[in-house]
Every structure is written in C-alpha cells, then in structure tokens.
Amino acid sequence: MSVYIPEDVLVNVLARLPIEIIVRCTLVCKLWFSLITGSNFISYHLNRTITNNKGHLLIRYCTDEPRKEYCSLRFDSNNTCDEYKRFDFPFTFLHPYIDVVGSCNGLICLSDYQFRYNLGIYLWNPCIRKVVAIQSPNVTLRSHGSFMHALGFGFDSVSNDFKVVRIVHLASVEVPPEVEVYTMKSGCWKNISDKALRYMVDVHSRQAFVNGAAHWLASTLTGENNFRNLILLFDMSREVFQEMPVPESVYRVDGWMGETSLVAFRESISLIKLWAYGDDAHCTVWVMKDYGVAESWSKQFSFDLSGGLQKPLGLRRNGEVIMTNKEGYLVSFDLERRQIMDLEIHVTTNWYYGHFFYVGTYMESLVLLDKGSEFHDSFVLQ
C-alpha cells in the first residue's frame, strides 16, 4: 500500500538531509528522481543552505607520499578546524597545471595554468562527484596571438546563473584587454571588451569573490616606471568593471606588488602581504572593515616569519591565517594570541606544486546534479 506525501512536505524533508542521502534518494523511484534533479529543488536546497550559513573551509593541497592531490573540507566555526570530508581531486597529479580559480555555491572552478595556451576550464561539484568542461573561449593564441589572462568565477543572484569572466592581456600593452563572459545557462561565451578598463591584472594572484563581484589585484602605469596599485572588480549581475582602493602603504610603489594575496573575508576583502629580504621575512594583514570604503582599510597584524612559518594561504572566518611551515605541515595561526595549531596535513615541500595550494570557503550544494558526468580517480586530463 503506497502512502501519498504532498510535494511541499517531501521537498522540505529531503532538503534537510545530508547531500549523500539526497543523492541516494534519487534511486527510490522516478518521481523522486525527477523532483530532486529538478532545477527548483536544487535552487531551494541551495537557498536553504545559504540561509543557514553552512559554509566550510576548503583546502586544496598536494602530497609527496603518495604523490596525489586532495581537497579537505573543514569545520570553520569551531576552534579545532576538524576535517569534515576529504575529496580526491578530479584530475590526477600527472597533470600539475590545473589550478583553482575560485569556489561559489558548491561549485569549484578549475582551469589550466594561466600561461598555457590550450586553455581548459571546468566546473566541479565534489559532493556529488560531477564535473563539466565548459566551452573553449573565443580569444585564443590562433585568433589574437600570445597573451596572459586572469579568470574570475562567481554567481549572478539576479539571473540565478553561474558566470566565468576572462580578462585577456594581449602582447602589446597599448592594446586594451579583451574580456569574455561565460554563463552556465547559455553554455557559451560573449565578448564585452567594450566595458574593459585599461588596467593590468596581476595574473599570478587569484580572484576573490564577495558581494556578487570578482576582485583582482591590478595596477596602472602613472609615469615612467611608476605604478598605482588598485583592486579591479567585476559585478557579475551588471557585468561592469569598477576600481577599488588598496591600503595607503601599497597604493603607489616603484614596481609590482610582489607576493600579495587578495582573499574574501567574511562579507568583505583582505590583503595579505608577504615581504622577504634575504633571510628576513614578515607578513602583514589588512582588512577592509566597511566594504568599498577606502578609509576603512585597517592593518590588523604584522608579524615576522622567523619562527618557522612560511607562506600564508588564506584566512579562516575567525581571522586565523592558514600557513605552511618549514616542516611541510599546514597550520592555523592565531594572530592575537600568537598561537599555532597544527592541522595535521603534511604537504609537498616542492615550491612549484605549492603554488597550486588553495584555501577558501565552500558551501555544499546539488548544483550540476541535473547535468555533467561523474569523474573517476584514474581520469587524466590530456
């Protein structure tokens, strides 16, 4: 004897279950499969997760023994930062050029390293083991010659769509950058180069997605060998670029910004600057306390790295800095108490592979459940 369950009740119950259980429920019957893989349920589940603020800390790292890549999800609301889940990376370590562009609403955007011309861009949902390769962009080596580019990834809350933005700097600095935007709903790229601003984006640093916009470190030439540093942002909904100020101490320099990282921090952004002069190295952390207000930049901490700490990778929600140490472990550094907590993750000490480490927030979702292919651990990107 079958029992009728009203759809609204069923949706409410299913949305409260862990992701793995929801996916298994698609096997119960055709009705449940159709309901769970439908866009309405996927959106409902995502909005519920956002409302409940169930975000975790995502750490992508590489190991030597075994030589492999992992993504570790950790609780970011407690002091211990315990591991919640661990995922195998969807591409094997035989292809070291895959980098994390960013994470948003359950999707992780991956791409070939910026300086490879056979560019591939992928959207991956590790919780449901789905990955899709997006269409190749239109601005290529064949069409425009040599280039460098920067990528941004985020969510347009107005159109309820994921977008990838690509800023392409061509060989000649006199030529404005080409700009392309990919939307997941359309499945294609469009050129919006007429909206480009004449700034040079730091292609060595990652974007930070916050408040509906992708942010990059950038600069503009103000005179002979003089640069004005700034933050370039792209509003995903309005598809326009804007300029945002950096702290006064990095506003104007005789050269590039060096090892500076721009990261999302709570509802704003933070700058982490690594200064190194021979054996002397120290780190400075700024936070923009009132998003978009230049005067709200505040130097939170400045500390030396002589105690065994090496490279800052990102910030936790409580303000602690995730770093590597000289022994090859990831640690969480409490800046106020000057206390170091070992995360018990031993990583490769190879400098080159360390470039591809990533720390950011991650929110579980069902996005891509209605599309994409399951990946296999033996999959090697060609």
Image: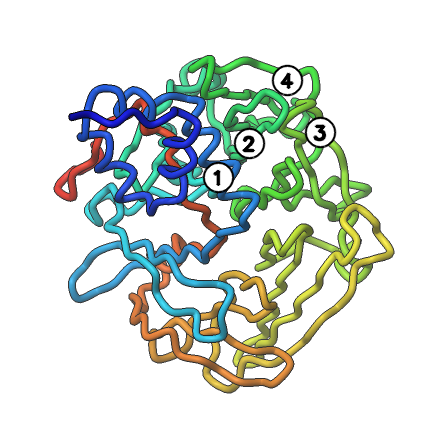
Image quadrant occupied by the N terminus: top left
Q: Quadrant of residue 283?
A: bottom right
Secondary structure beneath dot 3 equals: strand
Secondary structure beneath dot 4 equals: helix
> How far is mark 4 from mark 1, CA to CA?
27 Å
Q: Earlier in the sequence, mark 3 or mark 1?
A: 1
The residue tagged 1 is 105
Q: Are marks 1 and 2 in contact (CB under 8 Å)?
A: yes
Choose between 27 and 304: the one closer to the eye: 27
User: Which residue does the image show at 37% across and 60% down from the upper left?
Assistant: 354
Depth check, mark 4 against mark 1: the one in front is: 1
Indicate the amino acid at tag 4. Answer: Ser
Indicate the amino acid at tag 2. Answer: Phe
Q: Earlier in the sequence, mark 1 or mark 2?
A: 1
User: Which residue does the image show at 70% across and 25% down from the upper left?
Assistant: 240
> How far is mark 3 from mark 4, CA to CA?
11 Å
Q: Position of residue 51 (x, y in %)?
A: 57, 44
Depth check, mark 3 against mark 4: the one in front is: 3
Q: Position of residue 127 (x, y in %)?
A: 31, 43
The residue tagged 2 is 155
Judge whether residue 221 can be spotted in this image: yes
335 left or right of 125 in image: right
Q: Earlier in the sequence, mark 2 or mark 4?
A: 2
The residue tagged 4 is 193
Q: Position of residue 142 (x, y in %)?
A: 40, 16
